[in-house]
């Protein structure tokens, strides 16, 4: 179903003034209020089926090892998504175990994403932080070994995350 959104302004002044279901009423409004524009949008009512979709959580892990400062840092973020936006979890870009590695000005960075079990509780986060700190340290040991052997960043990525 189409709706007709009457908008006005630009950037920080942009706003929605009115919504219409009937196109002729929207155009009449704009005729009377010249500073407005019509934007047509589709509603999502026909897409959503009540009770069919699940919310799931995934963990984003970011680990940095700064060679110059001799300092490491790990951060874990819990993110949510749903099966409405991705009908099949396998289509969700973070479903498969995601890995990335990059190097910038003496810092080596590893990013991981993992799907969390449905029964995950935030009180489990310290356990996960300890677990993934060990995982990242293991990866970083491999990275440093590859660097000492003369491999470049692209080669390291290929060797780590095949």
Image (cartoon, grey):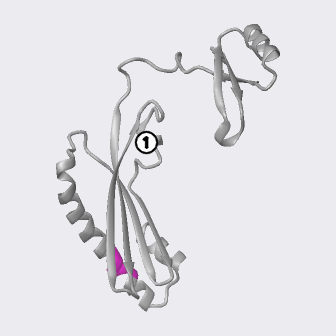
Magenta stretch: includes residue 64: no
Question: Nearest the camera: 90 or 110?
Answer: 110
Position of 107 with respect to 124 (left or right) is: right
Residue 82: image location, x then y, percent: 40, 35
Dividing the image into 4 quarters, which one contains the C terminus? bottom left
Magenta residues, start to end: 139-143
Residue 22: image location, x then y, percent: 70, 8
Give the residue number, with chain letter if any, for mark 1: 90
Position of 153 with respect to 66 (left or right) is: right
Q: Which residue is at a point 71% across and 38% down the rendered structure image?
A: 10
- The residue carrying pointer 1 sits among few (fewer than 14), some (14 to 19) or many (20 or more) residues within 10 Å by Cα, namely few
Position of 129 with respect to 84 (left or right) is: left
Specify the principal SS of the magenta part: helix
Question: Nearest the camera: 92 or 56?
Answer: 56
Q: How many callouts does the rendering have?
A: 1
Residue 47: image location, x then y, percent: 52, 20
Residue 37: image location, x then y, percent: 76, 25
Q: Which residue is at a point 47% across and 48% down the rendered structure image?
A: 93
SS class, disc 1: helix
Q: Quadrant of residue 146?
A: bottom left
Q: Which residue is at a point 47% across and 77% down the rendered structure image?
A: 156
Q: Is residue 76 above or below residue 35?
A: below
Position of 14 with respect to 31 (left or right) is: left
Dividing the image into 4 quarters, which one contains the N terminus? top right
Question: Nearest the camera: 27 or 113?
Answer: 27
């Amino acid at each position: 179903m189409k709706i007709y959104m009457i908008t006005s302004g630009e950037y920080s002044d942009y706003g929605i003034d009115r919504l219409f279901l009937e196109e002729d009423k929207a155009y009449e409004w704009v005729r009377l209020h010249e500073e407005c524009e019509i934007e047509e949008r589709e509603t999502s009512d026909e897409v959503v089926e009540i009770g069919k979709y699940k919310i799931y959580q995934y963990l984003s892990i970011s680990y940095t090892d700064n060679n110059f400062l001799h300092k490491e840092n790990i951060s874990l973020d819990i993110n949510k998504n749903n099966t409405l936006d991705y009908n099949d979890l396998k289509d969700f870009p973070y479903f498969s175990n995601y890995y990335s590695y990059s190097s910038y000005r003496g810092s080596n960075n590893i990013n991981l994403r993992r799907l969390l079990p449905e029964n995950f509780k935030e009180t489990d986060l310290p356990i996960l932080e300890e677990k993934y700190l060990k995982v990242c340290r293991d990866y970083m040991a491999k990275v440093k070994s590859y660097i000492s052997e003369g491999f470049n960043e692209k080669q390291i990525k290929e060797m780590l995350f095949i």
